[in-house]
Image: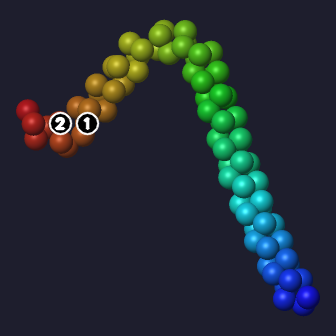
Amino acid sequence: EKSVAKEFKVAAAGLTLTLTKIVEVARFLYVGFIFGVTAIVFADLAQPIVEENRVRSNLIFGLVACMKPSAHSQI
């Protein structure tokens, strides 16, 4: 009878550990999902601003690319 109780305790501990892991993973996925949705929403909201700033950002990227030593070595 003691061995049955011991096995039950071990099983219960294993189940608790498994449930804890499942909760951790679920929480991680939930947080990731929230961040993903938030990022998508922000990207949608920022789209018009990005379109306006594209020329300016291209100019900045071009300047940065020119400043990089790798760009000079290719010329």
Q: Secondary structure at mark 1?
A: helix
Q: Quadrant of the C terminus?
A: top left
Q: Residue 50 in the image: state x and y as whole percent.
A: 50, 15
Q: Is residue 54 left or right of residue 45?
A: left
Q: In this view of the protein, which residue sits in the foreground, 10 or 32?
A: 10
Q: Residue 24 in the image: state x and y as whole percent.
A: 72, 56
The correct choice, above or below, for 2 with respect to 55 in the image is: below
Instruction: Give, as a three-letter code, the residue at label 1.
Output: Met
Residue found farthest to the left: 75
Dots 2 and 1: beta carbons under 8 Å? yes
Q: What mark, if any, has residue 67 been given in the picture?
A: 1
Picture quadrant where residue 6 is located: bottom right
Q: Secondary structure at mark 2?
A: helix
The residue drawn where x is 42% and y is 14% is: 54
Residue found farthest to the front: 1
Residue found farthest to the bottom: 2
Can you identify the residue that label 2 sits on?
Answer: 71
**Mark 1 surroundings: few (<14), some (14-19) or many (≥20) residues within 10 A:** few
Q: In this view of the protein, which residue sits in the foreground, 41 or 2?
A: 2
